C-alpha cells in the first residue's frame, strides 16, 4: 500500500508551536513551511494574482467592498487551495479603502499556513472554525418592581367602623371620598369637621 503522506503530516504534534490571539489558535507560517519542507523537499506554494480593471496586477481579490487572498500549497503533485479574507486583529474583514499592503501580507501568510494544514500538518487547530457564530444570548428583561406605596400597608390599616360610617351619614357628609374607604383616623377627622360645621349652622 502506498504511503499516505497526509497521515504522516497529521501525526506531527504542533501543540508547543501554537500561538493564541483573540481566542483563536495560530501556527506560524515559517514553522509550518519549515516542517513541510523537511519531509517533502519538493513541496511548493503559490500566491495567486489578480489583474485590476486599470491593468495593475495585485496579490488580492476584491468585490469592491472587502478583499481576500488566494494561495495554494502542492505536495506530491497534489495542490490544495486556500482563500482567506483580509482581516483586522478582531478577525473582521477590512474595508477595501482602509486595507494596507501589510494587512494583505499577513493574510497571505495565514492563508499559506491553512493551505499546508489541508495536507495534514496542524489541521486539528482549525477544527470547528467553520461553525456558525453563536448569537449572543439575550437576557430576559428584568421585571421592574413597582415602587412601594408611600401609604401604610393595607394589612395594617384600620378602616372606619360601622358607627363612624353611620355618624358621617347623619352629619350629612358629602365629600368625594366614600366613608367605607376611610381609615379610622380619616373618619374621626371628618366627623369632627362635620360637628363643627353643624354647630356653626345652628348658631
Image (spheres, rainbow, N blue to C red):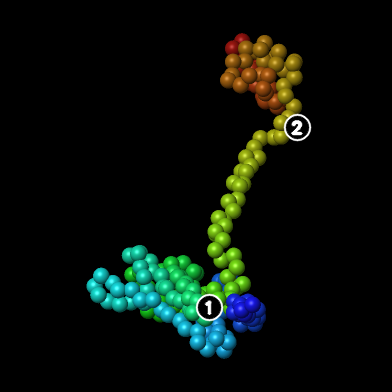
* Image side of residue 24 versus residue 72, left or right: right
Q: Secondary structure at mark 1?
A: helix
Dot 2: within a 10 Å radius of its alpha carbon, few (fewer than 14), some, or many (20 or more) residues?
A: few
Q: Return the residue at label 2.
A: 156
Q: Position of residue 95 (x, y in %)?
A: 38, 67
Q: Residue at x 61, y 43 (%)?
A: 144
Q: Nearer the viewer, mark 1 or mark 2?
A: 1
Q: Which mark is residue 192?
A: none
* Image side of residue 137 versus residue 110, left or right: right
Q: Secondary structure at mark 2?
A: helix
Q: Which mark is residue 116?
A: 1
> In the image, is residue 3 above or below residue 133?
below
> In the image, is residue 1 above or below residue 136?
below
* Image side of residue 198 versus residue 118, left or right: right
- Quadrant the N terminus occupies: bottom right
Considering only order in the chain, which callout, 2 or 1, is on the residue closer to the N terminus?
1
Q: Position of residue 74 (x, y in %)?
A: 48, 79
> In the image, is residue 65 above or below residue 176?
below
Q: Residue at x 62, y 12 (%)?
A: 172
Q: Residue at x 71, y 34 (%)?
A: 153
| Residue 77 in sight here | yes
Q: Quadrant of residue 192?
A: top right
Q: Residue at x 33, y 65 (%)?
A: 64
Q: Position of residue 77 (x, y in %)?
A: 49, 79
> In the image, is residue 49 above or below residue 185?
below
Q: Quadrant of residue 54?
A: bottom left
Amino acid at each position: 500500500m502506498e504511503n499516505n503522506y497526509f497521515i504522516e503530516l497529521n501525526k506531527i504534534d504542533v501543540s508547543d508551536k501554537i500561538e493564541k490571539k483573540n481566542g483563536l489558535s495560530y501556527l506560524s507560517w515559517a514553522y509550518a513551511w519549515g516542517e513541510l519542507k523537511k519531509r517533502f523537499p519538493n513541496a511548493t506554494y503559490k500566491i495567486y494574482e489578480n489583474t485590476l480593471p486599470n491593468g495593475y496586477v495585485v496579490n488580492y481579490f476584491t468585490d469592491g467592498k472587502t478583499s481576500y487572498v488566494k494561495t495554494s500549497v502542492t505536495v506530491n503533485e497534489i495542490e490544495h487551495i486556500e482563500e482567506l479574507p483580509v482581516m483586522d486583529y478582531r478577525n473582521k474583514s477590512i474595508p477595501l479603502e482602509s486595507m494596507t499592503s501589510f494587512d494583505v501580507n499577513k493574510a497571505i501568510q495565514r492563508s499559506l499556513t491553512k493551505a499546508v494544514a489541508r495536507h495534514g500538518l496542524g489541521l486539528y487547530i482549525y477544527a470547528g472554525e467553520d461553525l456558525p457564530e453563536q448569537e449572543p444570548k439575550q437576557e430576559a428583561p428584568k421585571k421592574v418592581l413597582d415602587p412601594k406605596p408611600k401609604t401604610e400597608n393595607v394589612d395594617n390599616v384600620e378602616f372606619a367602623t360601622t358607627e363612624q360610617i353611620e355618624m358621617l351619614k347623619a352629619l350629612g357628609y358629602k365629600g368625594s371620598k366614600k366613608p367605607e374607604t376611610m381609615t379610622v383616623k380619616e373618619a374621626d377627622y371628618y366627623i369632627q369637621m362635620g360637628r363643627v360645621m353643624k354647630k356653626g349652622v345652628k348658631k
